[in-house]
Image (spheres, coloured by chain):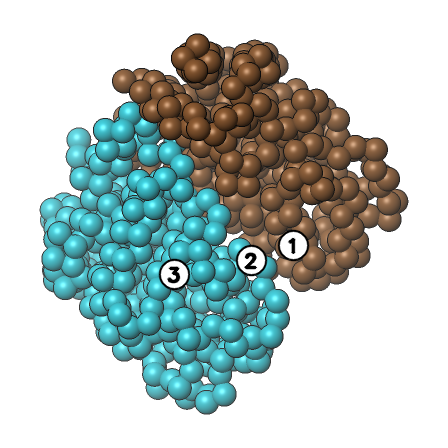
Chain colours: A brown, B cyan
Amino acid sequence: MKKHNFSAGPCILPQEVFKEASQAVLNYNDSGLSIIEISHRSKDFVDIMEEARSLALELLGLEGKGYKALFLQGGASTQFLMAAYNLLQTKAGYINTGSWSDKAIKEAKLFGEVAEIASSKDSNFNYIPKGYEIPTDLDYLHCTSNNTIFGTQIKEFPSSNAPLVCDMSSDIFSRQLDFSKFSLIYAGAQKNMGPAGTTLVVIKEDILGKVERQIPSMLDYKVHLGKASMFNTPPVFAVYTSMLTLRWLKKLGGVAAIEELNEKKAKLIYSEIDLNPLFKGFAATEDRSNMNATFTLVNEDLKETFDTMCKETGINGVNGHRSVGGYRASMYNAMTMESVAALVDIMGDLERKA
Amino acid sequence: MKKHNFSAGPCILPQEVFKEASQAVLNYNDSGLSIIEISHRSKDFVDIMEEARSLALELLGLEGKGYKALFLQGGASTQFLMAAYNLLQTKAGYINTGSWSDKAIKEAKLFGEVAEIASSKDSNFNYIPKGYEIPTDLDYLHCTSNNTIFGTQIKEFPSSNAPLVCDMSSDIFSRQLDFSKFSLIYAGAQKNMGPAGTTLVVIKEDILGKVERQIPSMLDYKVHLGKASMFNTPPVFAVYTSMLTLRWLKKLGGVAAIEELNEKKAKLIYSEIDLNPLFKGFAATEDRSNMNATFTLVNEDLKETFDTMCKETGINGVNGHRSVGGYRASMYNAMTMESVAALVDIMGDLERKA
């Protein structure tokens, strides 16, 4: 039975990427060696790293604009502290859209003053704060573009005189934005880019070198930039597989093409949520994420029936996070319309049955 | 043509591990899903993580002795700073056996006083220092068990009243030691354990909580211990493949069995280096590494001929590091006698030709 994988992350990647990555673990490029046994200093891997870095910038429209891309380790959780370690001299501003922002704020507080300049905590983070004032004395302003748990997504980004730092872990490469508004973008690979185990960091070099503290080498963006993302042994398989996914995206038509598909998938599921009286959406309509649709059953008694229907249809990973309950359909770039339609079909079936 | 992969790391892993990992990237355990698209919170992956952690302790003979195992990210390079962040309150002692120790010392200096209590720098690190005095006021004593670049290996570890911290990246699981002498062992996976992208940390919990500084969450061993190595999304593929390699080692008879094989391989190559007048070994005889044999040609004019012979025999990754020159044969756990014999054969052929 075909599986429809709605996992929030690690999550679905393109089938052709699974095939190519699987083959490379056996025998990379007909070299007689596995991709995971070759030296990271070999021409084969240096080429992979350079292609990954350059595809990332190209797909974001940031080539030739003073940006560099790095593939590091440690996930967004490490970036929470690295961003502050490298950039927070006195005071930083954070927009709190729930859990991930919360964690980023906690780590930043070890390095300086953190102004939480807006928050939607008052309503269990079911909306994106708007209309707040931004102090003018910030070292940087931090936001989280998409919240996987609550299913919210920033549609209009704040503008500030301070560098804009954004955790785009869960929606990078999913929609067109003017990425040059951001000075630092970071994203764990395991949603739209690749397997867990590498983190994309896209950085405008001119924001560095402004803090006085000494930074340990592995936490210093300058050190990684100086070594072209090869200061230490990179996570070879995760970088290779990310590069394959970025190649796939480019071939498909890039971010513009995938944005169109992502909007269609989102429209399909949100229409069903809105029209089907058995379900209700969690996030405020105007802030709904195109990546993670969160919704609950109006009548919880139907849960067992619906869970069984999901299982019988091969639908996987739709349980909501405990902070929200209900269901969450994560529809990252590699998810097909067919899979979203399979979910929507059984939501309709449930209505007809009930 | 069969390849004989002598890469220093990332390096050879067992062929059956490549096969199983490759299959799991297509379809894990007949689930219809790739290992890299399943949630790290799924029972499937939680079981993998627990098996990996428990196999690591079992193979080191550390079960039930107050140790825990973690699979983190960032390589030994991140451990250089984490060890100091978590343990260095006033003064730490480091034994400098070259490059990796050097880097560890550099990071530790950001956190307190570092006493370099012994070094073999005077002789380009071609031996392991011995007979040094160890101060009695150390927060911990740090050493590097095996140096991949110079081909040296500590045979007798220092004893100290301070906790012993050891970077075992390049020889963990390769030989029997009383591992309970160490309070903290760390090792990047990419030699004897798995692909690049995860780091094994084995820690005796009672050494923690003794420094006053606040530690960022991702750098805090206590945080990772409290979350059973799942504080954030772990590098799923690297942990899975490491677990497969540890299973393979256990099935083979564990560390005792592989130690016997590693000694045979080392004997074979070092005998050739010593008997063949065209080659000379780099490291002091008594400190020779069983993992990385470093040697040079007595007459550099033969280099092109020997390099061609290597290529024609499918011998890969034997170029020495630039700090030593010549050749380096890395013979990690998964390397077969057959491959070492193939290298020794052409060394003999060169002698007969020359």
Q: Secondary structure at mark 3?
A: strand
**Outermost residue to the right:** A136
Residue B65 location (% of width, % of height): 28, 73
Residue B253 location (% of width, % of height): 11, 57
Q: Secondary structure at mark 1?
A: helix
Residue at left 76%, top 48%? A116
Tag 2 residue: B217
Residue at left 86%, top 39%? A133
**What's the amino acid at mark 2?**
Ser
Residue at left 56%, top 34%? A148
> Split into 4 quadrants, where in the image is the N terminus of chain B?
top left
Q: Secondary structure at mark 2?
A: helix
The mark closer to the camera, 3 or 1, is 1
Using the numbered discs, state the Cα–Cα distance from disc 3 to disc 1 in whole angstroms.
25 Å
Is the residue at mark 1 from the same chain as the one at mark 2?
no
Tag 1 residue: A106
Question: Closer to the camera, A102 or A114?
Answer: A102
Residue at left 27%, top 29%? B31
Question: Closer to the camera, A283 or B116?
Answer: A283
Using the numbered discs, state the Cα–Cα distance from disc 2 to disc 3 in whole angstroms.
16 Å
Check contact, mark 3 vs mark 1: CB within 8 A.
Answer: no
Residue B256 location (% of width, % of height): 14, 64
Pointer 1 chain? A
Label 3: few (<14), some (14–19) or many (≥20) C-alpha neighbours in 10 Å? many
**What's the amino acid at mark 3?**
Val
- Look at the image and tell me whether residue A266 can be seen: no
Q: How many numbered marks are there?
A: 3
Q: Which mark is residue B201?
A: 3
Check contact, mark 1 vs mark 2: CB within 8 A.
Answer: yes
**What's the amino acid at mark 1?**
Lys
